[in-house]
Amino acid sequence: MSNQQITIKDKITSLIIGAVAIFLVLGAYSAIKFYISRPETPKVDPVVKEEDIKEAKREIPIDLEKYESYRKVDIYPNGLVTPQDLIRACEDRKRIPAQCNVEIARITKVFTTSGNIKEAYLYIKAGTSRDGAPFGTLTEFDSIWMYVDSSDFGGHLLRSRAIVRRQSDDGATELLYNLKETPFVGLPYRDDAEPRMRDILDKRLNIPGEHFIGAFVSSLGVGKIYEMKIGYEGGEIKIKE
């Protein structure tokens, strides 16, 4: 066999080895790329305790049934889309105090109470939208701020301490609180924060006379309160027109 034949054979062998190497490298790259970019499987693994389930199933229907059977006062009959002027004037660390108070006054409702209210619940249905998407549930970056009379009885409602926290059939967030123990937190909002508990029932609603109440969805998207109602037993609450 001539040297020329050996050289040609070596070249062919080298080309084959090179092609196989390239194929293996591309295949490994594709596999790594797929592994990195593939959707992560949710790691959901509940640990169920029978006594906890029984307690939760027993308490939630009782509070819902009470709220549904009580008289209602509708705070925002037409709902409330959070005004962008309010977000700009009241944004944390950029707050313009005088303008913020003006914007809060615009969304504040005046109500009167006779006192002698035995029990009261706050129900809120709210949602948010970003980049023109349909409204959906509140995210970890959204919260509901509300107050009665002053900041001492106000703040961001802690959703993890709501008696009822669920998604409605139309995709909004539904929350129910007992106004005897209303959980408020500051910023940054976190579901695991330790709340300030406020007795709005006895310290506010059961003081006869005129009071103020306001709320909005705090979001850098578009926030909307669909419904906000107080369900109560005993006494009388009236929204002033």
Image (spheres, rainbow, N blue to C red):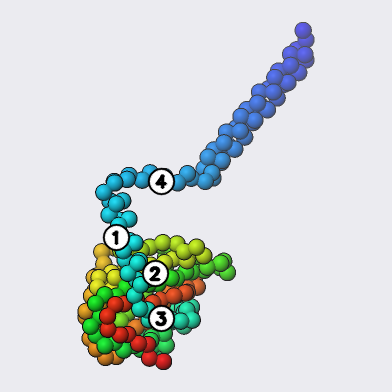
Q: Residue 9 placed where, x, y %?
A: 74, 16
Foreground mark, 2 or 3? 3
Instruction: Return the residue at label 2.
Output: 143
Kind of element beneath mark 3? strand
Query: Residue 188, located in which quarter of the rendered image?
Result: bottom left
Instruction: Point out residue 56 in the picture as x, y percentages from the top left corner.
Output: 30, 56
Number of numbered labels in the structure image: 4
Question: Label 3 neighbourhood size at 10 Å, few (<14), some (14-19), many (20+)?
Answer: some
Q: How far apart are marks 2 and 3 (CA)?
A: 20 Å
- What distance separates the C-alpha of mark 3 from that of mark 4? 38 Å
Q: What element carries label 1?
A: helix
Q: Residue at 42%, 88% (x, y): give it.
A: 106
Q: Which amino acid does label 4 sit on?
A: Val
Q: What element carries label 2?
A: strand
In 3D space, how far apart are the residues under numbered discs 2 and 4 (Cα atoms)? Answer: 25 Å
Q: Which amino acid does label 1 sit on?
A: Glu
State the quadrant of the C terminus. bottom left
The residue beneath circle 4 is 44
- The residue under label 3 is 74
- Viewer can see residue 160: no
Query: Which badge, 2 or 4, is on the more N-terminal residue?
Result: 4
